[in-house]
Image (spheres, helix red, strand yellow):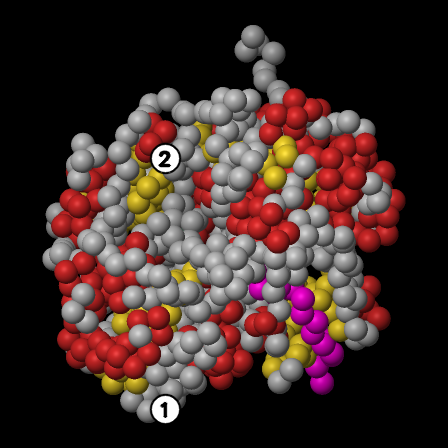
Amino acid sequence: MGEKKTVYSICGMCSVRCPIMVEVEGGRVRWISGNPHDAGMGTALCAKGIAGRALLDDTERPLSPMIRDGERGSGKWKTVSWDEALDYVAEKLKAIIDQYGGRAVLLSDRGGPFGEYRKAFLKAIGSPNYCNHDVTCAVSVNHAALSLFGFGRKTLNYDYKNTKHIVLYGRNILESIKIKTTKAVINALDRGAKLTYIDPRYSVTAAKATRWWKIKPGTDYALNLALIHIIIKEGLYDKAFVNRWVHGFEHLAKFVEQYTPEWAEEETGIPAQEMYLFCREIAQDAPHVIFHPGWMRARYKQAFWESRTTYILNILMGAIEVPGGLFFMKGPKDAGKKGLNSIGENLPKVEEKRADGAGWKYPYINKGPGLLHRAFEAIKTGDPYPIKAYFVHRHDPLTGLPDPEAQVEIFKNLDLLVVVDVNWSETSKYADVILPECTYLERSDLIANQKGLKPGFRIRTAAIEPQYDTKPGWWIYIELAKRLGKGEHFPYESIEDMWKKQLEGTGITVEQIQEKGFITLTDKPIWYDRMNELPFKTESGKIEIINKKWEDAGIPCLKPYEPPEKPPKGKFRLLFGRCAWQTHAMWMNNPALHPYLKENVLWINKKVAEEMGLKDGDKVVVSNGGYQKEMRIFATELIHPEAVFMLHGFGRTVPQQTRAYNRGVADQRLEVGLLDVYDPAGGANALCECFIEVRPAK
Amino acid sequence: MAKYYIYHDPTRCIGCLACEVSCMDWKGLPYGEANCRIFRFGPEALFGEPDLTFMYTSCFHCEKPLCVEACPSGALAKREGDGVVVFREDLCIGCRACITACPWGIPQWNEGTGKIHKCDYCVDRIDQGLEPACVTRCPVDALKFVRVEEASQLKRMRWLRDTFGRQVAPAANY
Ligand code: SF4
Ligand code: SF4
């Protein structure tokens, strides 16, 4: 027993960051649920979110700062104090900055709303080299949006609540859970909305869909071109909207003429007849329809064009800034209010070119998230300049990016590799220094913007004190900045100091936000006048079918379709995904979640398996390059014969994680040579351009 | 009389296991050993049609609970008033008689304690006006904690709704 309190905060078990309510008793977290003040959330929480309590008690994590005490990767560590660890990092950094300049420092993370201090830290030391994990996530989707609208993907969101038809391309929305979204989709389906799900593999989302198209892997672009062909040819598009807002429609119409549904049937395996029916059906529900442009679409070299044509389908349906379609995310300004202040004081402008080439070598690539795989190339070659220090913040490139062996080779060129994490990530094994962050339940973070129809702010507030010798991320970087003589940019002692700075002049107090965990700046949802005032950020102020930025770089916005490579004989295209109680390979070792999924299995087409003399449950060896491992198969008709599928995140190699250690197969280790294979227009790694061998185990 | 029922709607359920993890977390059960359990049929092609269906199983809190009749130590009992079949771990002698007696296989073995574990609708929560842990945190409201008569109505409506693919309401609600 002891003092009881309720804290409204933000979950940290996956990158969705759902609003939560945490009940604390006597300094212990007793209960976590969804934040009932948020109507779309209620008390709902997913299995991972609930397992946050098990995370707190899990001691198979780095629980105090550590410095490597042997070869890199040897797994030998010396536990040190924070002062020692930070002094050590600062000293190394100083030497690197003195010799190579601040630009020699790279940092990558998983993005998110709380990371301002990390970018500010880089600026303070004069480095332009911030990257998030987006090359293995949504970077191509982002560029597809930029090329059409002039703004990134996050400016538009989806109104599932009022939609009549949702179209998803492998966006496994019912297993890659975002609670509010997942619930809204289920509600929509219960109301009678339709769901078309396109995926070479069956999933829970497919199970709830009105229509599942078992598409040939890598042919989404062909399908989209044919759908656009039908929609234009049959005049099913929203003419008023297109006339008002689309610049270059005639190019599109002309371009898709050649891509008939009959042609696409050959390519995709989806009957042309079904495409016609689909288009006529969805046009009746327009504009209250959503073609999801994709989230984790870092799968094929054509990702940019897949996503771009998906956006175009929304545009043709007029599904922009309309209930049940896509809508603009509004910020404080739209509500006539002042936004948050940035925390960095008088930060110098960093003029230096980015090492990954974003913004100059690749002028059409957005400098925000950068291109981490190109930054790795710079580490490898020293071109355009040497990168000598790498901060990996709550990110795990050795799991998230392909081909960890190649990455470890590249990291040999680094003088300093620092991992800041809550967990033993695969990357932490190769770190020089591990700076353990406290968990999201033990940590307050910067106030974040909450964009939407009703913009506002939200906050993560620590429910309890850190239980081990771990620290919040912002504290770590500010301490480092001070040690590097850059303390003047961060005149703060506590998170409260930073909150104060963020809220200055907004008329809002932190207590007001904490009362419910969030605050909205308006009662009424804000909609723009969709025929008169849509703020597209392109040169023409309209949606651009042909965007100069890409065309000037020799990248056609309407790229002729290229069929995906056929798997060589005896090989399969490797697909991967998630289930609802694991994410981003983060919680394989969580004591509460581990029992529910100890190893992954290989989905393989039943007929194909039979031809190989295999039956469901048999063991096979999967291999590519130097990596091979045994696993069991799940033989099913419900996967395309060219593909095999496994859940991501297994085959872990950090021995401290005793539960997950060496269990299952690591898909990224099979993705040999894929670090340099990426979508040239959008920048995302093409993780599914991977063929692996499968043979019966002896 | 049994008053309550946990109604599970398989049309909404996404098999996400939040209910299991929620139960385990609230009840302090060994990891992986919740009182409720989600089972799945599929994924499979049933007569050529792909299918994947989830089923929630937990205690039904029977009118005439055979587990209670079989329990020699009084660890299982039907609560006065709301008819919840409650379990007192301190009284359980680990004889497993209830495991044999329950027709639905609800009481499960707890390795850690050498006793059984079984759902009690989170009486500690419902007595405070809350709902059972599984229901409270289900991400898609596939679970509903309702009175028994409501559950049977919901079930009938669900069947009609899924069969006809249209919204349905009792004709009298006009
Ligand atoms: S989806 Fe689950 S893990 Fe992710 S933020 Fe929401 S509750 Fe947390
Ligand atoms: S929590 Fe809800 S949706 Fe998830 S498995 Fe349980 S009943 Fe189904």
SS of the residue under disc 1: loop
What is the spatial separation of the Cα atoms under label 1 and label 2, in whole angstroms? 49 Å
Give residue A208's quadrant in the image: top right
Residue A622 numbered tag: none
SS of the residue under disc 2: loop
The residue pinned by badge 1 equals A71
Q: Is residue A60 above or below residue B99?
A: below
The residue pinned by badge 2 equals A331
Rendered location of residue A96, percent (x, y): 29, 80
Relative horizontal placement of residue A435, taking residue A683 as reference (left or right):
left
From where the camera sits, is residue A77 visible?
A: yes
A286 part of magenta stretch? no
Q: Nearer the viewer, residue A615 or A289?
A: A289
Q: Nearer the viewer, residue A5 or A538?
A: A538
Relative horizontal placement of residue B117, taking residue A462 as reference (left or right):
right
A696 part of magenta stretch? yes
From where the camera sits, is residue A190 visible?
A: no
Instruction: Please give the range of residues in magenta.
Output: A684-698
Work out which quarter of the rendered image holds the N terminus of chain B and state it.
top left
**What residue sits 30% from the left and 57% below the top?**
A349
Q: Is residue A418 above or below residue B92?
A: below
- Mark 1 Cα-neighbour bin, 10 Å: few <14, some 14–19, many ≥20: few
Q: Nearer the viewer, residue A657 or A316?
A: A316
**What residue sits 38% from the left and 37% below the top?**
A451
**What residue sits 39% from the left and 81% below the top?**
A414
Q: Is residue A108 above or below residue B155?
A: below
Q: Main secondary structure of the magenta part?
A: loop
**What residue sits 53% from the left and 46% below the top?**
A146
Work out which quarter of the rendered image holds the C terminus of chain B and state it.
top right
Give residue A633's quadrant in the image: bottom right
Q: Amino acid at mark 2?
A: Gly
The chain letter under disc 2 is A
